[in-house]
Amino acid sequence: MLFVRRVAAGAVIVVLAVGLTVMASVKFGSRFEPAAESAPVSGAGTDRVTGRNIARLQEHLRAEPKDADGWAGLGLAYVEQARVTADSSYYPKAAAAFDRSLSISPKDNEPALSGKGALAAARHDFAEALRLADQALKVNPYGTRAHAVRVDALVELGRYDEAEKSVRRADSLKPAVSIFTRYAYVMELRGRPDEAARVLRLAATSATDPADVSFVRTQLAELAWNRGDLRDAERDYAAALRTDPNWLPAIDGRARVRAALGDAAGAIRDRQALVGRAPLPSYVVALGELYEAQGMKAQAREQYAVAGAWATLARSNGVTTDLEGAITATDHGDRAAALVAARTEWNRRKSIHVADALAWALHANGQDKEALGYARQAARTGYRSATFRYHLGVIEKSLGRRADARRDLKAALALNPHFSDLHAPLARKALKELS
């Protein structure tokens, strides 16, 4: 079934709803990363298209300043522009546009409410995103964007039972590609990757829009990568790129596969292209780690500094960056600051990704007994993550739990022996020491 897109009043706004529901997982390496990716960040040209849409809307609103739907559409366009350019300075502009829409039409303004929910998720304020999505769904129970934001918020808050109920309800009310992909992600997080793959294959048969096709094939590739299947991952990333050669998440995946297959030069080319187009933290840090794995320490340090600068700018525009800050700083920066950031984020939300980040930050600060509890929290849903198992194994090794450490390090490498340019070799080294 086709991705349902709401059309705001006037032909000038028709294209703005494309790809604008928000999957706001902020985890490094996340499939829905960073702030606004129900359709992932696309490639060169998308920012120009969105920029033209913004210009058209601004012209339209100069002539029709009382068009509430037009202001909501402009807000969404600003969120989208932030997404495709990694420029968080568009978020305050989006907030002002949504507020203008609500001032004109304060009652039952579903486009502005769901748009504000998308913006809140993009800024990583998931409690507020959930509140706004619920408000929007009271106005329009069939709103695809509001349902998508609601599922995203529940996932990021660590409320996985509710997220599954929410996505099943959304699917029963109004099936859409954006709902199918969220359904699959919830299944994967709950330790059911086979069901996730089944849902994504169903989505692939129903997707006709090129953006939806590339998105779904990329998600299938991510599932294959997470289980260490390089052949299927390479095939699906290639299929996504045949549909759109500039689809950045697929280029990101292709870089990982190339590095795993020993093509470091090809992987570096892909990663440099990604950072040049969208300097998002996950892309920047991945390039830094690839440089570091190749012994290019100075270039790696430059990339880690860029990631820190991005976080500073994002915070100035209302984005909460404690999780990504903790992940970067634990491995590549101030470990004490990483722990503060991870604890702060855990106080906000209890997701498995935050639990893993806190466990790793605690380990980096020599607090392995406490770290073990959070590492086990990260495993509570059955999510199959080589990184999570590696972190757990290293923590167990530090505590002298040798049998447990051997088991979990072996499991990490069995699940995906190429899970990290930096840490997969360290996992093999740690396992050898235990043997």
Image: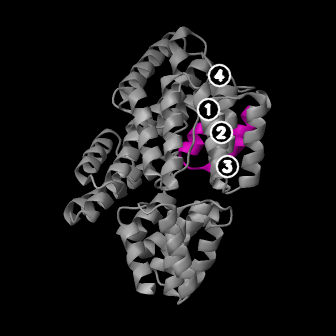
- Disc 2 element: helix
- Disc 4 element: helix
Instruction: Identify which residue, 247 or 141, lies in the foreground.
Output: 247
Observer-side mark, 3 or 4, equals 3
- Disc 3 element: helix
Q: Is residue 131 magenta?
A: yes
Observer-side mark, 1 or 4, equals 1
Q: Which residue is mark 2?
A: 199
For residue 216, above or below residue 410: above
Residue at image location 22% in from the left, 50% down from the top: 265
What amino acid is labelled 4 in the image? Ile
Badge 3 density bin: few <14, some 14–19, many ≥20, Cα 10 Å:
many
What amino acid is labelled 2 in the image? Val
- Who comes first in sequence, dot 1 or dot 4? 4
Instruction: Give how far apart the Cα atoms at labels 3 and 4 are.
Output: 40 Å
Q: Which residue is mark 4?
A: 104
What amino acid is labelled 1 in the image? Ala
Badge 2 density bin: few <14, some 14–19, many ≥20, Cα 10 Å:
many
Residue 187 marker: 3
Residue at image location 68% in from the left, 34% down from the top: 146
Residues at marks 2 and 1 touching, judged by CB atoms closer than 8 Å: yes
- Who comes first in sequence, dot 4 or dot 2? 4
Q: Position of residue 422 (x, y in %)?
A: 35, 66
Q: Which residue is mark 1?
A: 203
Instruction: Identify which residue, 207 or 230, lies in the foreground.
Output: 230
What amino acid is labelled 3 in the image? Met
Magenta residues (range): 113-136
Q: Main secondary structure of the magenta part?
A: helix
